[in-house]
Image: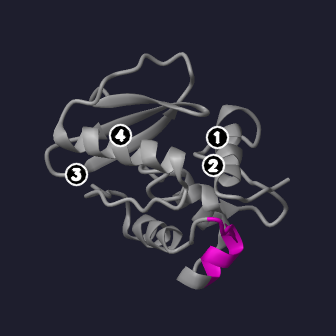
């Protein structure tokens, strides 16, 4: 796997960014002990700057060229997620109904999102609470990241 083009500080740890000349390819949540890497490359610098602005103001809108891979179904889910406004949450079931699918499949596609924060999968929650995050169990680092992102946007989920 290509090394990160930037690793920046985040209120919950670090954020790793992979980009090339054409687009941002991946954003990864990393623990606090990950080594920081100064952004190199035009898009890595721009992505790092926009993510930092989001940490200052959750209403910030991302404007980055994204290299979105995935299956046609995953892209449909990610497009649906992108339509959820800052400060709002949908359940996996609500998003599934909108795109004509089922909650479990939507949850799997959410967990495979290569560009979290920019494609705000943290805004999709379980009907009974916060739900999982990034294919990780409901407890631990990733759940804390999801909880922080939601709280940053003014949402409190049990």
Give SS at disc 4. Answer: helix
Question: Residue 58 — which label?
Answer: none
Do residues under tags 1 and 4 come within 8 Å of each other at their CB atoms?
Answer: no
Q: Which residues are magenta?
A: 87-97
Q: Work out how far the residue at label 3 is from the one at label 2, CA to CA, in angstroms.
A: 24 Å
Question: Circle 1: is it few (<14), some (14-19), or many (20+) Cα within 10 Å?
Answer: many
Q: Which residue is mark 1?
A: 145
Q: Work out how far the residue at label 3 is from the one at label 1, CA to CA, in angstroms.
A: 24 Å
Do residues under tags 3 and 1 come within 8 Å of each other at their CB atoms?
Answer: no
Q: Which residue is mark 4?
A: 48
Q: Which residue is mark 3?
A: 23
- For marks 2 and 4, the one nearer the N-term is 4
Let me know if residue 30 is in the magenta part.
no
Residue at x 75%, y 43% (from the top left corner) = 138
Looking at the picture, how far across and down is residue 32, in whole percent? 56, 21
Do residues under tags 2 and 4 come within 8 Å of each other at their CB atoms?
Answer: no
Q: Which residue is mark 2?
A: 149
Let me know if residue 94 is in the magenta part.
yes
């Amino acid at each position: 796997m290509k090394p990160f083009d930037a690793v920046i500080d985040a209120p919950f740890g670090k954020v790793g960014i992979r980009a090339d000349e054409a687009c941002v390819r991946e954003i990864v949540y990393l623990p606090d002990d990950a080594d920081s890497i100064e952004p190199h490359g035009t898009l890595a610098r721009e992505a790092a700057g926009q993510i930092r602005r989001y940490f200052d103001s959750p209403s910030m809108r991302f404007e980055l060229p994204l290299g979105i891979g995935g299956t046609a179904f995953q892209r449909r889910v990610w497009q649906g997620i992108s339509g959820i406004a800052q400060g709002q949450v949908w359940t996996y079931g609500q998003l599934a109904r909108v795109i004509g699918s089922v909650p479990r499949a939507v949850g799997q596609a959410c967990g495979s999102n290569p560009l979290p924060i920019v494609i705000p999968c943290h805004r999709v929650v379980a009907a009974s609470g916060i739900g999982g995050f990034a294919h990780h169990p409901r407890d631990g680092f990733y759940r804390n990241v999801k909880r922080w992102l939601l709280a940053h946007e003014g949402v409190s989920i049990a």
